[in-house]
Amino acid sequence: MGKSRAKIQKAYRERLKEKNKEDYLKRERERKRRNYVSSHQLSERDREERNRRNRANLREFYARKRAERAHQDSIQTSGYESRGIEEDTGLETSDERHTRNGGNETERGRLLVRLDFNEINRGRQKAALKRWKRDRSAAVSRVRILEQERDKLKTKLKSTQRALQRVRKSTESTKHVPSVELTPIRQNETWRPQI
């Protein structure tokens, strides 16, 4: 069964990309830079979606880097071969002695040196992560305590406002309604009842 026009065109575009890879990547970077929308212009849903995609890309990138580092660690040598060192010094290895003594081995071994700089970096990364977790935990607990204090102060404020409102209400009611009704006789303070 033959290919459809869409598949043929797609294969053609892929071949072009592979042929001019650097040019294609440059144009793609320019296109992304030109069409970039900053995060404060996105809706919350779109921003979360973009963040999720970025995190996935970052995980993939770090996994690829880890695989490359592991591959480099496995083939890492000192850069000096035993042959070059022995010719200068005149020393011979046990492999050479074995070959000279009638052994079947014809290749000489290489001097392998493993440098564990990555282990040191991992220790630093673990320490930094531990420090970050500790600081974050302290900040979260401090926020929780401050929120509890804020809630207590809010309830105290509300109860104080209610009490103040009750006091104002009671004083307003006593101002409008006099406690002793004044009659024309009582209004005249100089008047005294005669006994």
Image (cartoon, helix red, strand yellow):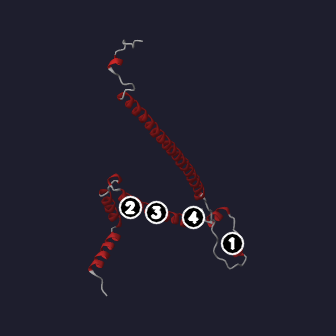
Q: Position of residue 122 (x, y in %)?
A: 58, 57
Quarter of the image with the C terminus is top left
Position of 93 relative to 119 (above/below): below
> Which mark is nearer the camera, 2 or 1?
2
Q: What separation in Å lies between label 3 and label 4 (alpha carbons)?
A: 18 Å
Residue appearing at x 60%, y 62% in the figure: 78
Q: What separation in Å lies between label 2 and label 3 (alpha carbons)?
A: 18 Å
Q: Which quadrant would residue 168 be assigned to in this image?
A: top left
Earlier along the polypeptide chain: callout 2 or callout 3?
2
> Which mark is nearer the camera, 4 or 1?
4
Earlier along the polypeptide chain: callout 4 or callout 1?
4
Q: Is residue 111 left or right of residue 29?
A: right
**Residue picked out by circle 1:** 95
Earlier along the polypeptide chain: callout 1 or callout 3?
3
User: Which amino acid type is marked by label 3?
Assistant: Phe
Q: Position of residue 63 (x, y in %)?
A: 50, 64
Quarter of the image with the N terminus is bottom left
User: Which amino acid type is marked by label 1?
Assistant: Asp
Q: Residues within 10 Å of mark 1 (few under 14, many from 20)?
A: some
Which label is found at residue 49? 2
**Residue picked out by circle 4:** 73
Earlier along the polypeptide chain: callout 2 or callout 1?
2
Q: What separation in Å lies between label 4 and label 2 (alpha carbons)?
A: 36 Å
**Residue picked out by circle 3:** 61
User: Which amino acid type is marked by label 4?
Assistant: Asp
Q: Which quadrant would residue 18 be assigned to in this image?
A: bottom left
For label 1, the SS is helix
Foreground pick, 121 / 150:
150
Residue appearing at x 36%, y 59% in the figure: 45
